[in-house]
Amino acid sequence: MSEKSKSDIEIAQEKEDTKARIMGTVPRTITQMCTLCRNAVQASERYPSYLCGRCASRAVDADGKQPWREVQYWEGPCFVDSVPCWLEEAHLGGTVVRIVESLTDEQRKDRGLG
């Protein structure tokens, strides 16, 4: 299989396998990618299109601020590298950021996004 015909997940899995061989560890199975940067992320059935921590850390509101860092609970629209996203509290704590266009129609409606 040529490099061009491989999927992002296959390429990420090869990188993970190589890293594990070098480190002498067991490779983790790559099944999900960050929607923005395409880096491998831990698979999540609940959030199939969430952003990796590196991308999510760049999220800002319309004023270029990160109000969720100052309050315990914050949910709303945000931007990562000018891409419209939605930040919300994750099911078991923490936050999750997803690109707005990756949300289902029902999820957009529930959030007042269309």
Image (cartoon, helix red, strand yellow):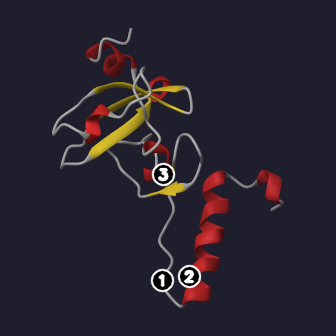
Amino acid type of the residue tagged 3 in the rendering: Arg
Q: Residue at x 48, y 51 (%)?
A: 54
Considering every residue shown, the one lying at the far top of the view is 114
**Separation of residues labelled 1 and 2 (CA atoms):** 6 Å
Q: Is residue 68 above or below residue 76?
A: below
Marker disc for residue 26: 1
Image location (x, y in percent) of residue 43: 41, 55
Residue hosting label 2: 20
Q: Is residue 43 left or right of residue 106?
A: right
Q: Residue at x 84, y 60 (%)?
A: 2
Q: Residues within 10 Å of mark 1 (few under 14, many from 20)?
A: few
**Separation of residues labelled 2 and 3 (CA atoms):** 21 Å
**Separation of residues labelled 1 and 3 (CA atoms):** 23 Å
Image location (x, y in percent) of residue 72: 15, 40
Q: Is residue 72 or residue 23 the one in the foreground?
A: 72
First in sequence: mark 1 vs mark 3 = 1
Image location (x, y in percent) of residue 91: 20, 44
Q: Nearer the viewer, mark 2 or mark 3?
A: 3
User: Looking at the rendering, in which quadrant would you find the C terminus?
Assistant: top left
Marker disc for residue 95: none
**Quadrant assignment, res 66:** top left
Q: Residues within 10 Å of mark 3 (few under 14, many from 20)?
A: few
Amino acid type of the residue tagged 2 in the rendering: Ala
Q: Residue at x 59, y 46 (%)?
A: 37
Image location (x, y in percent) of residue 111: 29, 17
Q: Nearer the viewer, mark 1 or mark 3?
A: 3
- As helix, strand or loop, the secondary structure at mark 1 comes to loop
Residue hosting label 3: 54
**Quadrant assignment, res 83:** top right
Q: Is residue 85 or residue 27 the one in the foreground?
A: 85
